[in-house]
Amino acid sequence: MKLAPIVLFVYNRPDHTLKTLQALQRNTLAAQSTLHIFADGPKENASAELLNKINTVRNIISAEKWCNEVVLHEFSTNKGLYRSIREGVTEILEQYGRVIVMEDDLQTSSAFLTYMNQALNFYADRKSVFSITGYNYPNSKMSIPTDYQYDTYVSLRNGSWGWATWIDRWNQIDWDVKSYETIKNTPSIKEALNRMGDDEFEMLQMQQDGILNIWSIQFTIAHFINHAVAIIPCQSYVDNIGLDGTGENCGVQSSLQHSQLN
């Protein structure tokens, strides 16, 4: 099986980063995989406490051989999540053509890499599939029908908590979202977008107004305008352990966490 490189983005959360790497190391295919870790730098006028956390994270990522090969990309200044992911994912995709993407607060099942790589291979020639996601909602949020016979399902909405894609899909992202005015001023298109989730247009609007500095909504719009889908597992391979108020973009949302993974 052709194995995709893993990209992990880290910043200033040493406890989360360590748990993420330890879980990744326990994956069945970790010993055969290449891991690229992108470590963002401090913001201007960062406090001594923040600098200490950033340095602790860098000590952690270099402490062990978390996968077969670990390549460190450490930055002296702060890029922010948007630039980090856009530039980092693009760099690795241009080298390898496919990628598995993680952030520093994702605790994975030992089967996560197996699932992601199998899905990347299986759906590679199915051009309407733009992404693979390792996370699914808990049953309390969205239950799968008991008579559903498959391991995965198709979603209009892509996920950003442990995901993967290919370069030909990634290259179809319009980072400026030139379709925004059309979406905004056409009620039927706006309604269609919100079939992906009733917060989608709101997120797009906040991104366009400069309130949110995010990358994921642009990938979502690429799915939308290309009539593409994401593949989601029925049982999650990922638990987001960062829903505790420590992240840049997520608050406390314990209802989205898992007690058991696939």
Image (tube, rainbow, N blue to C red):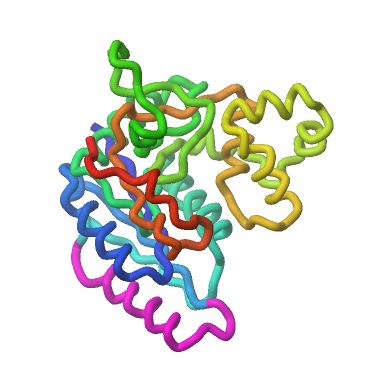
The quadrant where residue 80 appears:
bottom right
Name the residue located 19 percent from the left edge and 54 percent from the top edge.
25
Instruction: Please give left or right for residue 49 compared with residue 71 in the image.
Output: right
- Image coords of residue 223 (percent x, y): 58, 30
Along the horizontal axis of the image, is 188 left or right of 78? right
Q: Is residue 205 covered in magenta?
A: no
Q: Nearer the viewer, residue 162 or 257?
A: 257
Residue placed at 36% from the left, 50% from the top? 240
Residue 126 x/y as whole percent:
45, 20
Residue at left 44%, top 80%? 50
Q: Position of residue 100 (x, y in %)?
A: 37, 44
Magenta stretch, main secondary structure, is: helix
Q: Residue at (54%, 39%) from the top-left corner?
A: 170
- Nearer to the camera, 226 or 11: 11
The one nearer the camera, 1 or 50, is 50
Residue span colored magenta: 43-65
